[in-house]
Image (tube, rainbow, N blue to C red):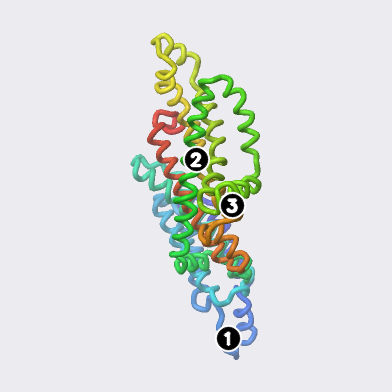
């Protein structure tokens, strides 16, 4: 045992491979070919079945050797992902024919990827660049395996693409619909979302400053704000369309309403976050309200403000897309989703969803980077 370090993921992957081998055929065509050896029947994994077993078993065994962590990661990554690629390419054209060994081998490859991510999570590189790269690689592998399992299960089980298209079909639709998607993104994101986001967050921030300065507003506005923030978007959107028309302006108004109160509440809470000792110190320096606000209270409120900005980055996108369901020009992500659902073009719906998710993630990430740069002193950023 001196040369080995046991891993339950690797051991489980080996056991799943053994069980898959004992169960026999991976697909229905393979079972027919074995039952009628005199008849030539094409079936998936004809030349790759043994290689899939070798990759999984070899990677699992190598990962349990006492070798450098990066070597184990390389073996696991190659074994898991090449085996998964062979499983995915082999089932194409034979959708709905998979048997239990197919899913067992898929689970074994997934366990190897799990072990790979576990080893990466335990690494503590001293280099900041390596540490930043590690923070990207781990969620990337996790996300890739969500897509792999999705693709493998949909094709293996023969789920109709009209109910749940595989990621590959969604990717093809995105590649073939780039002009349409670009026009929808321009209408929804660059017009409705950005305008409404800036107006809503800016108005919420300024109102919070005013409510902090005027006690009457602070006590009277916040309860109303909490009530208005609970209004359903499906009720607000049609009213905004009636007021501002079918253009992007009505969608921006919906986004502004949705983002106003989270910014208001978070900013007011953040302005009260500075301690009494710090405020007393500012008074001893004869600081007026503006000086105290700029030098003490706003910096203390910065984490709360950025928290509102991050929350609003997702609310704005959701609000604009839902608002487009209630009347819009013949362009926009919400319009496209509602229209293509009626046409049963589900792959186009998923393409719009994927693009919206990607843009929302990028938007959120940019705000998070700005937060790290602006609040570098905060314990949550510097690890204190």
Tell me the quarter of the picture where residue 336 sits. Answer: bottom right
Point out the residue furthest to the top here.
Answer: 284
Between marks 3 and 1 in the image, the one whose residue lies nearer the viewer: 3
Which is more N-terminal, label 1 or label 2? Answer: 1
Q: Are the residues tagged 3 and 1 within 8 Å (C-beta)?
A: no
Residue 222 location (% of width, % of height): 60, 28
User: Mark 1 = which residue?
Assistant: 41
Residue 51, position as x, y percentages in the image: 48, 71
**Mark 3 or mark 2, which is nearer the start of the sequence?**
2
Mark 3: which secondary structure? helix
Q: Is residue 256 above or below residue 191?
A: above
- Say which of 104 and 215 sits in front: 215
Which secondary structure, mark 1? loop
Give the distance between the C-alpha atoms of the residues marked 2 and 1, in whole angstroms.
56 Å
Choose top left, top right, bottom left or bottom right for residue 340: bottom right
Characterize the local packing of mark 1: few (<14), some (14-19) or many (20 or more) Cα atoms within 10 angstroms: few
Q: Rounded to the nearest whole Å, what is the CA distance between mark 2 and mark 3? A: 19 Å
Q: Which residue is mark 3?
A: 322
Q: Quadrant of the C terminus?
A: top left
> In this rendering, does residue 153 appear at all?
no
Which of the labelled discs sits on residue 310, or is there none?
2
Say how many tags the image has.
Answer: 3
Q: Earlier in the sequence, mark 3 or mark 1?
A: 1
Where residue 112 appears, x then y in whole percent?
51, 57
Residue 187 in sight in this render: yes
């Amino acid at each position: 045992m001196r040369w080995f370090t046991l891993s339950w993921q690797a051991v489980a992957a080996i056991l799943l491979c053994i069980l898959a081998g004992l169960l026999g055929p991976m697909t229905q065509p393979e079972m027919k070919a074995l039952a009628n050896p005199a008849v030539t029947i094409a079936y998936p994994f004809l030349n790759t079945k043994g290689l899939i077993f070798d990759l999984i078993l070899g990677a699992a065994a190598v990962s349990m050797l006492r070798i450098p962590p990066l070597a184990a990661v390389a073996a696991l990554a190659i074994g898991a992902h090449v085996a998964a690629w062979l499983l995915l390419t082999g089932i194409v054209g034979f959708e709905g024919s998979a048997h239990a060994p197919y899913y067992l081998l898929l689970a074994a490859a997934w366990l190897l990827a799990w072990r790979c991510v576990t080893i990466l999570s335990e690494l503590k590189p001293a280099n900041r660049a390596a540490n930043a790269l590690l923070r990207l690689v781990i969620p990337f592998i996790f996300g890739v395996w969500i897509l792999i399992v999705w693709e493998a299960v949909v094709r293996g089980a023969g789920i109709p693409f009209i109910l749940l298209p595989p990621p590959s079909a969604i990717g093809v639709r995105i590649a073939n619909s780039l002009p349409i998607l670009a026009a929808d993104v321009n209408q929804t994101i660059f017009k409705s979302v950005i305008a409404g986001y800036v107006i809503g967050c800016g108005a919420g921030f300024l109102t919070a400053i005013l409510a902090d300065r005027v006690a009457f507003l602070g006590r009277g506005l916040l309860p109303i704000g909490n009530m208005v923030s609970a209004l359903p978007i499906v009720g607000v959107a049609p009213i905004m369309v009636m007021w501002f028309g079918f253009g992007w302006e009505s969608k921006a108004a919906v986004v502004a309403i949705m983002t106003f109160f989270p910014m208001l509440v978070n900013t007011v809470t953040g302005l009260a976050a500075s301690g009494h000792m710090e405020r007393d110190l500012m008074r001893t320096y004869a600081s007026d309200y503006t000086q105290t606000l700029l030098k003490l209270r706003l910096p203390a409120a910065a984490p709360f403000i950025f928290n509102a900005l991050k929350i609003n980055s997702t609310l704005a996108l959701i609000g604009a897309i839902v608002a487009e369901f209630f009347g819009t020009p013949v362009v926009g992500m919400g319009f496209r989703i509602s229209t293509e659902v009626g046409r049963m073009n589900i792959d186009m719906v998923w393409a719009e969803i994927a693009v919206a998710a990607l843009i929302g993630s990028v938007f959120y990430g940019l705000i998070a980077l700005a937060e790290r740069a602006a609040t570098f002193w905060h314990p949550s950023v510097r690890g204190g």
